[in-house]
Amino acid sequence: MRVLFAAPTRLWDEWAPALQAACPEIELCRDGAPESFDALIYAPGYPEDGSTLDFSPFVNARLVQSLWAGVERIVTNETLTQPLCRMVDPGLAIGMTEYCLGWAMRAHLGMDSQLQDGVWRNELVPPLASERGITVLGMGELGRSVAGTLARLGFRVTGWSQSGRPVEGIEVLPGDRLGDALSRAEILICLLPDTAETRGLMNARTLSLLPEGATLINAGRGTLIDEGALIEALEAGRPGHAVLDVFQIEPLPADHPFWSHARVTVTSHIAADTRPTTAATVAAENLRRAMRDEPLLHRVDRARGY
């Protein structure tokens, strides 16, 4: 099986050994005649001259396997007619769960209120997890992992997705009940993909539906939030604090007001990463399925964008 590594050169040394170990039967190549390839392993930034990849010549490719969970930078490519699959990496889910759990617990326990200034604040006793409402926007692989972990710790967890598809152990509200989901969110965790429906979803109106003093954690996509509206909403206390890992422009410009805002914590898109050691096995399974004409894992629905 001949596979093109259609990804930036800097990724080769880390990914090639993992992919070849997981799927030794493949011939992994960095270039060659397009019609000679049975599949492509793809990551944004290819081609490296800044042009858009033309998938038309890859007439024999049965699969385009993305290395990233997000596919917004490829799904709109009109030359892409081959099956496209996003990456659902177990390591990515673990990393995202740990990030969201850490920041949620920091907010829940009020850690930042315990100033080391000599003042005894014995009255600042946090509630139990069962007394705290957390809402997770986006109930895909990552959202289910985060919501399930928080629920097992005893938090009152509400999930929200456009479809409202049921998730065992979690109450999931459908698209038309976004207001209800937000009103329960003493802690709001945003893990939505970048689609036409999610861009700007958190705006002046929806932010105002949060409980006073709520904490917003966005580790999904920066396009979800109207950044100007969020700054104004923080001044009004809804939310009371925002932990932001993703932004409309990345890297976040040094003069962006988020950096200096007292109610914003910026992390540099580090919530979770795709790890070759765990992701390569997912790619290998899809490569084998493609060659056997079997259903592919995590195939992208072009109409939905993910």
Image (cartoon, helix red, strand yellow):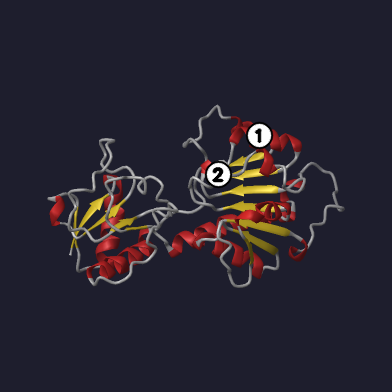
Q: CA distance from mark 1 to mark 2?
A: 14 Å
Residue 210 picture location, percent across and down: 72, 47
Mark 1 residue crowding within 10 angstroms, few (<14) / some (14–19) / many (20+):
some
Mark 2 residue crowding within 10 angstroms, few (<14) / some (14–19) / many (20+):
many
Q: Is residue 238 above or below residue 301?
A: above
Secondary-structure class at tag 1: helix
Q: Nearer the viewer, residue 215 or 159?
A: 159
Residue 78 picture location, percent across and down: 30, 45
Q: Disc 1 or disc 2, which is closer to the eye? A: 2
Label 1–label 2 contact, CB within 8 A: no
Q: Is residue 233 above or below residue 25?
A: above
Q: Quadrant of residue 236?
A: top right
**On the image, numbered disc 1 is attached to which residue?**
231
Location of the N terminus (image quadrant): bottom left
Amino acid under label 1?
A: Ile
Q: Earlier in the sequence, mark 1 or mark 2?
A: 2
Secondary-structure class at tag 2: helix
**On the image, numbered disc 2 is attached to which residue?**
224
User: From this viewpoint, which residue is outermost toward the top?
Assistant: 255
Amino acid under label 2?
A: Leu
Q: Is residue 225 above or below residue 27?
A: above
Asked whether, in this view, residue 24 is left or right of residue 238, the answer is left
The residue depicted at 33 percent of the width and 49 percent of the height is: 43
Asked whether, in this view, residue 165 is left or right of residue 49, the answer is right
Asked whether, in this view, residue 5 is left or right of residue 209, the answer is left
